[in-house]
Amino acid sequence: MRDKKVFVDIIRGYFTAQEVELPAFDRTGLVILQEIAKPDPDMHIIEKQILRDPALTSQLLKIANSPYYRGLQEVTTVRNAIVRLGLSEVTQMVTLLSQKKSFASEDSLTRDYMDQLWVHSVACAMGGKWLAKIIAPGKVNEVFFAGLLHDMGKAFFLHAIHILKKNEQLAVDIPQSYLEEMMNTLHAPLGVKLLTLWNLPTIYCDVAGKHHNDFTEDQDVILTMVSLVNKTLNKCGIGIRHVPDLDLVQTAEAKALALDPSHLKELEQVVQNSLNFIKDNT
């Protein structure tokens, strides 16, 4: 496919249709995400949801016993994991593990992008968690989940490309320049659309839609933190984009959060270190 206008028209037509196939969102992850958003989340509901999925339980116990978390005694049950790691940490890891299904693709072109996007999203979640512990300790969960979900519009877009190719509505030979340009243009509004259809809290929809917007003084601190971590990942080349010359010190987000160069260097190290966790555990 060499006609850019035809490509654009097909993509826009797909997303304006009445019925659009959504990427998978694991029910266990959704229930847990909604429960942890409550003022007083119920540990037993979260534990029950995890235990319904033996594969998820196994993955959680593997992480709980990994060098990243390991204590003196082996963790053998979900309840032990909650006691050892804490409810928030377990919820974060379970949502992360269950969410990977949304980044799956059978198509070789979109799979490569999805793999990069997955690493970028997890690194954003982990970098955001570290930053929130410094800036807003009461918002660690929200920043983690907002970071994990901030680029779901790209996953939605790539999922559509896969569907259209499978249905022979798009040619196999899509120029990557066309694909990347459209993905960059559409992913923010698509992220809002997808997370809204998934019935997720408004803050996650806002971050998905606004994380590339110019900084404003009245924006939510969660958005500010995720936007800064996203820029840090771009500087480090973790994900699809690489902007090595980006000066994080001069970003509006770093100034608004009153972060000095040492904080920003440490943030870069945190997201780099997250790559080992992603490789070993997801």
Image (cartoon, helix red, strand yellow):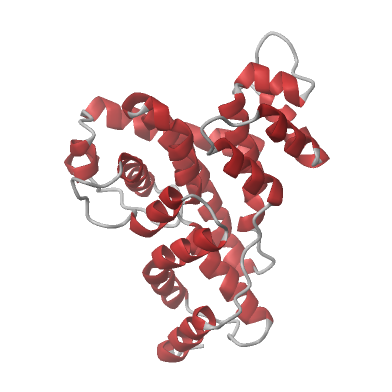
Q: Residue at x 78, y 23 (%)?
A: 77
Where residue 188 sits, quadrant-wise, is bottom left
Where residue 247 sits, quadrant-wise, is top left
How many discs appear? 0
Q: Is residue 232 left or right of residue 255?
A: right
Q: Residue at x 26, y 47 (%)?
A: 219
Q: Is residue 62 above or below residue 151?
A: above
Q: Residue 160 at x, y = what percent?
A: 57, 73
Q: Residue 56 at x, y = what percent?
A: 75, 39
In this rendering, does residue 246 appear at all? yes
Q: Is residue 63 left or right of residue 203?
A: right
Q: Observer-nearest residue: 228 or 36?
A: 36
Q: Residue 53 at x, y = what percent?
A: 79, 42
Q: Residue at x 58, y 39 (%)?
A: 278
Where residue 161 sits, quadrant-wise, is bottom right
Q: Residue 59 at x, y = what percent?
A: 73, 35
* Quadrant holding the C terminus: top right
Q: Is residue 73 above or below residue 6?
A: above
Q: Which residue is at the far top?
A: 72
Q: Observer-nearest residue: 147 or 278?
A: 147
Q: Observer-nearest residue: 208 or 167?
A: 208
In this rendering, does residue 65 appear at all? no
Q: Observer-nearest residue: 204 or 168?
A: 204
Q: Residue at x 62, y 73 (%)?
A: 162
